[in-house]
Image (cartoon, coloured by chain):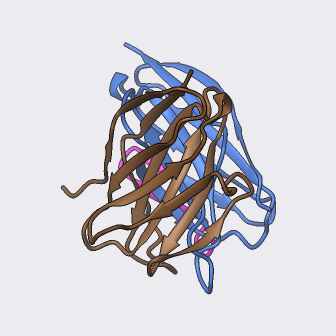
Chain colours: A brown, B blue
Amino acid sequence: EPEVTQTPSHQVTQMGQEVILRCVPISNHLYFYWYRQILGQKVEFLVSFYNNEISEKSEIFDDQFSVERPDGSNFTLKIRSTKLEDSAMYFCASSTSLGRNTEAFFGQGTRLTVV
Amino acid sequence: GENVEQHPSTLSVQEGDSAVIKCTYSDSASNYFPWYKQELGKGPQLIIDIRSNVGEKKDQRIAVTLNKTAKHFSLHITETQPEDSAVYFCAASWAGGTSYGKLTFGQGTILTVHP
């Protein structure tokens, strides 16, 4: 069964460093998302991406964050100058289309720990 | 923006009993309501969804009901089994037009099914 894969499963980084979280969406999907979940809190939407550009982003997704689809298979989230409060589980998701078919498939997540 | 509230935060049942998880949403424009199950170390997996043109949907032991007037929807699991133990999330989105499928999640419910 096709699945969304994320790497690494756990990333530890020093405060102020840059991290890149990687995702391989399901191959025929067109819409890509990043969500995060701070421990004990809700899963929060960060950004959606379609046709090689950001289609929607939340207030959380400020200039510290960027996304990219560098090739036909990967979808990355870059966090510059990490802060302690960026520590969270980051989930990538993808879906085939809008409208009636909005089922989003999630990856297993990357746990980011900023120390 | 949309806000989704989910109750209870924890639910403990005996094997064979039913479990009910309830969610409310704030944005009357939301028209897509998925439920996700998250097991330890895995990403959220869609288990059932419902759209606003339907009041109830059932898939084997799982059913979801939607009350658009009251803006609430519920997940019902019958004949629970220990493997149903997981965290369950409800979510809401507006699917269609220029919406790109952003999901707003509830807080999650930790369901424990005791053998």
Determine the image quadrant of residue A56: bottom right
B18 with respect to B59 (left or right): right
What residue is at 40 percent from the left and 63 percent from the top?
Answer: A94
Classify the position of the C terminus of chain A by image quarter.
top right
Residue B62 within the segment the image draws in magenta: yes
B18 with respect to B82 (left or right): right
Relative image position of residue A65 (x, y in whole percent): 59, 54
A13 or B101, nearer to the observer: A13
Relative image position of residue B52 (x, y in whole percent): 63, 71
What residue is at 49 percent from the left and 32 percent from the top?
Answer: A112
Relative image position of residue B1 (x, y in whole percent): 80, 62
Residue A82 within the segment the image draws in magenta: no
Seen in the picture, residue B62 relative to A33 is either above or below; the reply is above
Seen in the picture, residue B10 relative to A85 is either above or below; the reply is above
Per the rendered image, the range of residues in magenta is B52-63
A25 or B70, nearer to the observer: A25
Relative image position of residue A19 (x, y in whole percent): 47, 42
A89 with respect to A40 (left or right): left
Determine the image quadrant of residue A109: top left
Please give the count of numbered marks on the rendered protein.
Answer: 0
What residue is at 27 percent from the left and 72 percent from the top?
Answer: A72
What residue is at 50 percent from the left and 51 percent from the top?
Answer: A78
Classify the position of the N terminus of chain A by image quarter.
bottom left
B56 with respect to B73 (left or right): left
